[in-house]
């Protein structure tokens, strides 16, 4: 990874931060963004003190101009872009019949449009390097998760967007990968939105039983190096479920409902 330049959105915590540290440890120059300027400065100081090359840009990926500025800052600082990891995202927990549509708009703005904006402005530079565009989606991008309607919709949209970008660039040398980590111990569930748009707070799931963000980052870096099309992590909740969805969709619908209904304070039973 020496002399490679990697952009990671939503990198103040969780998978994004873990990816930033993993790439930095492998010698890459890392450009990260998040909404929290304070957290970014802490990460910058930590990585710089360890001798790593790091650039931070406070940015809200739902705003096109912020995404454009992230790309411009990176090229100005490092001269190129090899890898873009679209990781920034938010979740939600509510039934569609109850949810305020403003919540749906917010999820699409951050998850889907954030990916579109960053990819749009970074793509010309990535094409010069025959590099990689990555979208961190979810099992919810392959299977509709009840109680996560806005989240699933946005992740399905990202999958479709990136699949199309891949096909359009079959002859350019561009690598496109969709990464579906499965349930991961991170802050994304604590910040998940409820039906009225307020933050959920404590996650209803047992974080200690999940794959860590650091484990996910190692898998992602290896998969990007191998230029894989799709990375689906965890076996039962991930690979097996996605496989069975093709052949036994009704059965997967049933078990998905039962699995999600077991959450504490589930909005459905």
Image (cartoon, rainbow, N blue to C red):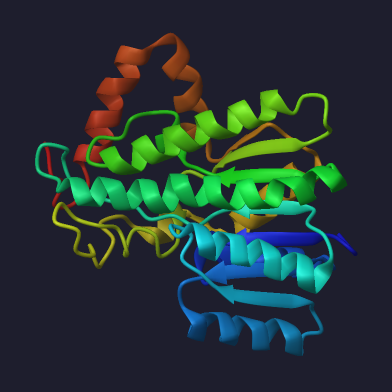
Where residue 139 appears, as percent x and y from the top left, is 45, 36
- Residue 121 appears in the figure: yes
- Residue 21 appears in the figure: no
Would residue 197 be found to the left or right of residue 232 on screen?
left
Where residue 241 appears, as percent x and y from the top left, is 44, 26
The quadrant of the rendering that contains the C terminus is top left
Q: Residue at x 28, y 61 (%)?
A: 203
26 above or below 154? below
111 above or below 6? above
Where residue 8 appears, as percent x and y from the top left, is 63, 61
Q: Residue at x 27, y 51 (%)?
A: 92
Of 84 and 211, nearer the camera is: 84
The quarter of the displayed image where residue 30 is located: bottom right
Of 152 and 75, nearer the camera is: 75
The quadrant of the rendering that contains the N terminus is bottom right
Task: Kindly give the residue lying farthest to the right in the view shown.
Answer: 2
Would residue 95 be found to the left or right of residue 133 on screen?
left
Task: Kindly give the residue lying farthest to the top in the view shown.
Answer: 247
Q: Residue at x 42, y 18 (%)?
A: 245
The quarter of the displayed image where residue 260 is located: top left
Mark count: 0
Q: Residue at x 73, y 76 (%)?
A: 54
Would residue 184 be found to the left or right of residue 145 on screen?
right
Where residue 35 appears, as percent x and y from the top left, is 46, 72
Of 45 and 189, nearer the camera is: 45
């Amino acid at each position: 990874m020496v002399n490679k330049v990697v952009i990671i959105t939503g990198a103040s915590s969780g998978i994004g931060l873990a990816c930033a540290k993993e790439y930095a440890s492998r010698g890459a120059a890392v450009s990260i963004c998040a909404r929290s300027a304070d957290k970014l400065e802490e990460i910058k100081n930590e990585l710089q003190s360890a001798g790593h090359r790091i650039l931070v840009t406070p940015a809200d990926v739902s705003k096109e101009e912020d995404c454009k500025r992230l790309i411009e800052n990176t090229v100005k600082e490092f001269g190129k872009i090899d890898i873009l990891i679209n990781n920034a995202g938010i979740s939600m927990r509510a039934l569609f019949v109850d949810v305020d549509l403003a919540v749906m708009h917010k999820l699409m703005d951050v998850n889907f449009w954030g990916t579109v904006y960053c990819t749009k402005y970074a793509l010309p530079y990535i094409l010069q390097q025959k590099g990689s565009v990555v979208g961190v989606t979810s099992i919810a991008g392959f299977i509709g998760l009840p109680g996560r309607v806005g989240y699933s919709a946005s992740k399905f949209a990202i999958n479709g967007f990136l699949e199309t970008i891949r096909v359009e660039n079959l002859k350019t040398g561009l690598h496109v990968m969709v990464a579906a980590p499965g349930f991961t111990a991170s802050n994304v569930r604590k910040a998940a939105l409820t039906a009225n748009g307020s933050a959920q707070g404590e996650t209803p799931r047992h974080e200690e039983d999940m794959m860590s963000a650091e484990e996910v980052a190692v898998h992602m870096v290896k998969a990007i190096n191998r230029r894989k099309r799709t990375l689906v992590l965890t076996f039962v909740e991930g690979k097996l479920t996605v496989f069975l969805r093709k052949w036994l969709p009704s059965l997967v619908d049933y078990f998905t409902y039962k699995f999600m209904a077991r959450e504490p304070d589930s909005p459905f039973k």
